[in-house]
Image: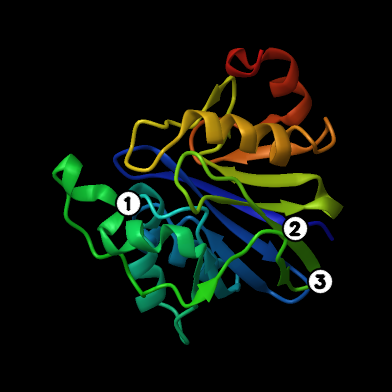
Amino acid sequence: MPLEIVKFTLGPAMTNAYIVADNDSNECVVIDPAWDGHLILAEAEKRGWRISNIWLTHAHFDHVGGAAAVADGSNPPPPVALHPDDYWLWREKGGASAFGLEFDPGPEPSVDLEHDQKLFLGNFELQVRHAPGHTPGHVMFYCQSENLLFCGDVIFQFSIGRTDFPRGSHETLIESIQTQVLTLPDETILLPGHGAETKVGVERQYNPFLQ
C-alpha cells in the first residue's frame, strides 16, 4: 500500500502541512506542522494513526506554528527533527516577531538532520536532501519508491523560495534546486510548503526562475 498523505493549508501564510502515514503500521509523521496543531492531531486520531515524529524542512515560524499543540496532544510527544544550521532560527522563534506575531515554537528539536540521511516511516525509506538558500538549514524529504519530494520552500509551482529573509541567498538557492531537485526524475511529484503540487519535469521546462 502506498504512503497516505493528508495535506492541510494553515496559518497566516497559508502554509502546507502534511501528515504522511504508513497504513500497514498506522505510524505517521507530521512534516511542517504549520499552524492549528489541534486540527492535525484530530485528523491523525480519526484515522487511528500514531504520530511518531515531527520533521521540519526549516524553522520559519509558519512551518512550526502547530508543533507545540501536536506534541502536547501526543503520547508520548514525538521528537522534532531539524537541520542544525536552522537551530538559530528556531531559537529566534522562526522570525515571527518581524511580523508582529508571538507563538510557542514547541519542543526543542532533538534529532539532527543531515544530507543523505535515511529516515524510516514504517516500511518506507525517505532521504534527507540538504537544500540551503531559503534558510541555511533547509532540507527536503525524498521518497524514491513513491516518486515524492517534500520540498518545503525551495521550489514552488512556477516559482522559488524567497531569499530576502535573514541568511537567505538567491545564488545558493538556485544551486540547491539545480543539484537537489532537477537531478531527480521528471515524474517526481513536488509537494511544496505553499501552493499546489507540481512535478520536476514541469518546473524544469516552465519555471521562469530556472530558465
* SS at mark 3 in the image: loop
Could you give the CA–CA distance between mark 2 and mark 1, rounded to whole angstroms?
Answer: 27 Å
Element assignment for label 2: loop
* Real-space CA distance between mark 3 and mark 2, rounded to the nearest whole angstrom: 9 Å
The residue indicated by pointer 1 is 61
Residue at image coords 73%, 71%: 120
Q: Which label's residue is closer to the chain start, 3 or 2?
A: 2
* Left or right, 24 with reference to 208: right
Instruction: Give the image location of residue 67, x and y in percent.
Output: 38, 65
Q: How is the image coloured?
A: rainbow
Q: Nearer the viewer, mark 2 or mark 1?
A: 1
Q: Horizontal and vertical percent for residue 30?
A: 54, 62
Where residue 51 sits: x, y (%)? 55, 73
C-alpha separation, residue under disc 3 versus residue under disc 1: 31 Å
Whether the residues at callouts 3 and 1 have beta carbons within 8 Å, the answer is no
Q: Residues within 10 Å of mark 1 (few under 14, many from 20)?
A: many
**Type of residue at label 3?**
Asn
| Residue 65 visible in the snapshot | no
Quadrant where the image shows the C terminus = top right
Nearer the observer, 145 or 82: 82
Does 159 appear above or below 148? above
Residue at image mark 3:
123
Q: What amino acid is labelled 1 in the image?
A: Phe
Which disc number belongs to residue 3?
A: 2
Residue 44, labelled with which disc? none
Residue 37 position in % (x across, y down): 38, 61
